[in-house]
Amino acid sequence: MSDSRTLDGTSPLGVYLKKTPRSQTYYFVYDGLSKPSKMKISIGRSDKNDLCIEDELVSRKHAVIKKDDENYFIKDLKSKNGTFVNGHMLAPNEFVNIQENDLLKIGRTEIVFKKFF
């Protein structure tokens, strides 16, 4: 984590993150108190995603993060290069519970999952 930055903001889905450069570590911040109890955040190379990652190793529609009550889940959308949580590759199309400080890796981009209450 030699070069890390914090990005946070608001959008209809609870988060707005600008396009991210490759090979960087970012902190994904979600304010659970001011957002709806259910949400989804799409991640991929396409600018139609909520989190757009400019990286040729990232699929156009790569993964989705979902909040259900107080729990957060990530699902790989059958991406070509996979989605990793704490170094473990996810099975495609299966939601996996993610916790505070989990390291998500999508292409060359690492995301440290955080939630603030």
Image (cartoon, grey):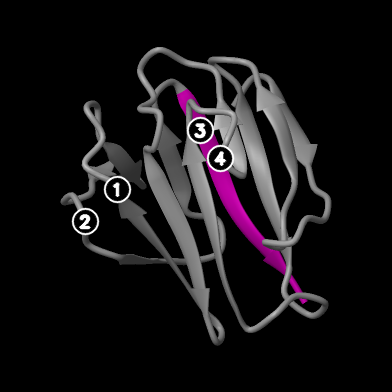
State which mark lies toward you, 4 or 2. 4
Rate crowding at label 1 as few (under 14), some (14 to 19) or many (20 or more) other CA atoms within 10 Å: many
Circle 2 Cα neighbour tier, 10 Å, few/some/many (<14 / 14–19 / ≥20) = some
Separation of marks 2 and 3 at Cα, in angstroms: 20 Å
Q: Which residue is mark 4?
A: 49
Compared to 108, does 76 lie above or below?
below
Give the residue pinned by disc 1: 76
Q: Point out the image quarter for the C terminus.
A: bottom right
Label 4 secondary element: loop
Give the residue type at disc 4: Asn
Q: Mark 1 or mark 3: which comes first in sequence?
A: 1
Q: Secondary structure at mark 2?
A: loop
Depicted 79 relative to depicted 109: above or below: below
Q: Which mark is residue 28?
A: none
Q: What kind of residue is marked 2?
A: Asn
Q: Which residue is mark 3?
A: 110
